[in-house]
Image: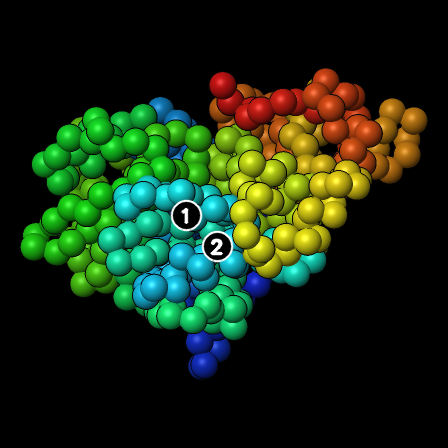
């Protein structure tokens, strides 16, 4: 079964000038733990330590820690910061209070998704957290579309990001910082202090489990990583690679940029309509998205379960029961938690309703699948 869990990594590479892969402050720790290292978005990152399946199950049942330092972080401050954020994103950042977080697509003039990002409302402005493979592109796009009175700063090389995910994540994080997290709601954050250093502590997650993100200066990286492992031993903590992160997010039906969404897809097609506020002032891509909404989308991103033997993979054709091609798989695997194949893909809108039966071309054979509503996991 191990070989059936395939890690679909983004193909975009961001290399240093000497052609070498970038490293995070925790690279030496990953190597010491015996991690299998791969090229991910131009970074040398751990894809697994002891195995994707074991790591996946650790997060579902106990707690895992992830090095996500390859992600990008941009700070926007100044009197024009809100106008800039609302101009480049589809969601409405004006509703955010300090300490709140918002998911939002970043779109081009045609409504295509440049990236899907998190917007943190800070005391001084906003912190944008972007995907690693898109960091340089996103920065250039935002910089080119700054509203007057906005200061933009790239903090990506200054910050380490560790994610703590799983049902035992809260007690572990509480023990590390000596605080209670009972009042910290999902998609909010606070500032805490660790060894005299400020740490931004948020509660979002990308795994379908309760989870936290720790942002802090690079100098604290080794100490914080070791602390998570040492204090987490009683909770069954393990380091988790990008392979399990991919299967975890798929079970939670969370789209992966470069697979399920991209500049050739819009938020309306991807089922992200609730994050598109067409009633706010003009933003990049608004006219195109309004037109698409008025005319109706022609395709939609759906989730499906495979009811016969066969693993869906990115690019496999999706067909109706008459054998006509209606779309393609964007993500797929054998679910470690459910123990059957699952996937996502775009289909003609006529076949997007839940309970619709379709077929997948898996190599030389056709296998049946069924469209579902909501997440794969309850």
Residue 76 percent across, percent down from the top left: 36, 63
Residue in the picture at 31% in, 39% down: 188
SS state under label 2 = helix
Residue in the picture at 62% in, 48% down: 261
Residue, far left: 196
**Residue designated by label 1:** 94
Q: Are discs 2 and 1 less than 8 Å apart at CB? A: yes
Q: The N terminus lies in which quarter of the figure?
A: top right
Viewer-closest of 370 and 196: 196
* 132 versus 278 height, above or below: below
Visible residue check, residue 311: no
In the rendered structure, the answer to whether residue 4 lies left or right of residue 71 reads: right
Viewer-closest of 48 and 107: 107
Residue 202 percent across, percent down from the top left: 29, 42
Residue 368 percent across, percent down from the top left: 77, 23
* 307 versus 363 height, above or below: above
**Residue designated by label 2:** 86
Q: Residues within 10 Å of mark 1 (few under 14, many from 20)?
A: few
Residue in the picture at 70% in, 53% down: 288
Q: How many labels does the image show?
A: 2
Viewer-closest of 302 and 16: 302
């Amino acid at each position: 079964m191990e070989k059936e869990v395939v890690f679909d990594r983004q193909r975009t590479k961001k290399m240093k000038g000497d052609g070498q892969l970038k490293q995070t402050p925790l690279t030496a720790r990953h190597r010491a733990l015996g991690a299998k290292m791969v090229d991910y978005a131009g970074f040398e990152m751990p894809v697994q330590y002891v195995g994707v399946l074991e790591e996946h199950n650790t997060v579902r049942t106990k707690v895992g820690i992830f090095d996500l330092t390859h992600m990008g972080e941009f700070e926007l401050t100044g009197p024009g910061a809100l106008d800039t954020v609302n101009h480049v994103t589809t969601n409405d950042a004006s509703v955010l209070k300090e300490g709140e977080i918002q998911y939002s697509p970043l779109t081009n003039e045609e409504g295509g998704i440049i990236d899907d990002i998190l917007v943190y409302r800070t005391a001084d402005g906003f912190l944008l957290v972007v995907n690693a493979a898109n960091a340089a592109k996103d920065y250039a796009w935002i910089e080119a579309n700054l509203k007057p009175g906005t200061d933009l700063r790239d903090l990506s090389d200054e910050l380490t990001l560790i994610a703590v995910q799983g049902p035992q994540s809260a007690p572990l994080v509480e023990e590390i910082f000596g605080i209670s997290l009972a009042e910290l709601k999902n998609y909010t954050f606070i500032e805490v202090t660790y060894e005299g250093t400020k740490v931004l502590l948020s509660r979002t997650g990308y795994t379908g489990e309760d989870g936290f993100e720790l942002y802090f200066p690079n100098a604290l990286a080794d100490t914080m990583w070791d602390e998570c492992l040492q204090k987490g031993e009683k909770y069954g903590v393990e380091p988790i690679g990008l392979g399990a992160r991919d299967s975890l997010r798929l079970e939670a039906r969370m789209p992966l940029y470069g697979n399920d969404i991209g500049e050739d897809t819009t938020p309306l097609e991807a089922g992200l309509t609730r994050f598109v506020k067409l009633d706010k002032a003009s933003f990049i891509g608004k006219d195109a998205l309004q037109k698409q909404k008025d005319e109706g989308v022609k395709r939609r991103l759906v989730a499906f379960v495979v009811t016969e033997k066969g693993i869906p993979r990115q690019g496999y054709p999706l067909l109706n029961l008459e054998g006509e091609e209606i779309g393609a798989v964007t993500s797929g695997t054998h679910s470690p938690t459910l123990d059957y194949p699952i996937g996502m893909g775009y289909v003609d809108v006529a076949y997007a309703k839940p309970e619709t039966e379709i077929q997948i071309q898996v190599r030389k054979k056709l296998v049946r699948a069924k469209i579902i509503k909501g997440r794969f996991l309850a």
